[in-house]
Amino acid sequence: MALNSALVRVAGTGEISLAKAGTPEPPDATTPLPAAWTGLGLSTSDGVTARRSVDKQGTEHWQQLTPARYIYQGQELTVASTFQESKAVVLGVYFGGMTFVETAQGSKKYRAEISSVPRSDVRALCVDWTDFISDTEIYHHRLYLPRAEVSETEDAQWSRSQENRWGMTFATLAPVGGSTVLGVWLTDDPAVLATPPALTAGKAS
């Protein structure tokens, strides 16, 4: 058995950010995202749930019960979180691209229309999270999805007993231009390597 408690990771803090679909991949996991990206802000302590599912069907045979091979029929990669800030970017993606405008210049009164016709609202998405193990051991992770869209929204409940919450699931869309890359994971954590570097005083050497 190869047990190593030093390789346990905890996503202590992080954020989901959105940009226009096709916004270039960030250079690494630590460089701050440029102005093209907008953070969705605070989310509940459940953080982020990432899910990958592959739909496949086994072949059926007269002579045997076990499939000889599988035929792949679909794949889905999703990112879900429940957001707590009621602001433009959060409300916009929750309601399918809805935007608020001032009813009259200087009125400080705003209006938005919720369309009866759902429309596509494709974005690039980044999930950032950091594990602060110690002052000398801090690891950053960034999941970049070039094309994603809200595939499901949770019920929004407005009450005096808790803050407004906006639960959403983002699903990746097929890449364009012949690419086969659904997403990219960037990190400075050596634990992801098949043979991690030796650890010296709690930090990779």
Image (cartoon, rainbow, N blue to C red):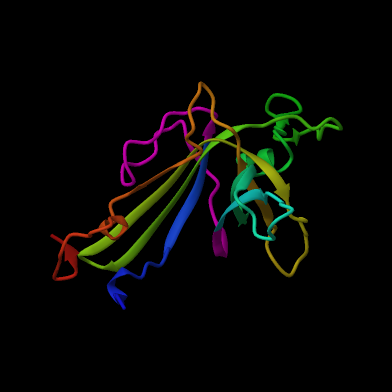
- Which residue occupies the extreme front position in the image? 63
Q: Percent position (x, y) of residue 80?
A: 61, 53
In which image quadrant can residue 50 be found? bottom right
Tell me the residue at 67%/32% (across/down). Answer: 121
Looking at the image, which is closer to me, 166 or 50?
Answer: 50
Tell me the residue at 13%/60% (across/down). Answer: 205
Q: Percent position (x, y) of residue 123?
A: 58, 33
Tell me the residue at 17%/60% (across/down). Answer: 197
In which image quadrant can residue 102 be found? top right
Tell me the residue at 24%/64% (across/down). Answer: 137
Q: Is residue 114 magenta?
A: no
In the image, which residues are magenta? 19-48
- Which residue occupies the extreme top position in the image? 177
Q: Percent position (x, y) of residue 147?
A: 56, 34
Magenta span: chief secondary structure: loop
In which image quadrant can residue 151 be found? top right
Looking at the image, which is closer to me, 16 or 71?
Answer: 71
Q: Percent position (x, y) of residue 3?
A: 31, 77
Vertical placement of 204 versus 177: above or below?
Answer: below
Q: Is residue 31 magenta?
A: yes
Say left or right for 168 vs 185: right
Vertical placement of 196 versus 153: above or below?
Answer: below
Vertical placement of 94 versus 181: above or below?
Answer: below
Say left or right for 44 vs 111: left
Say left or right for 50 vs 137: right
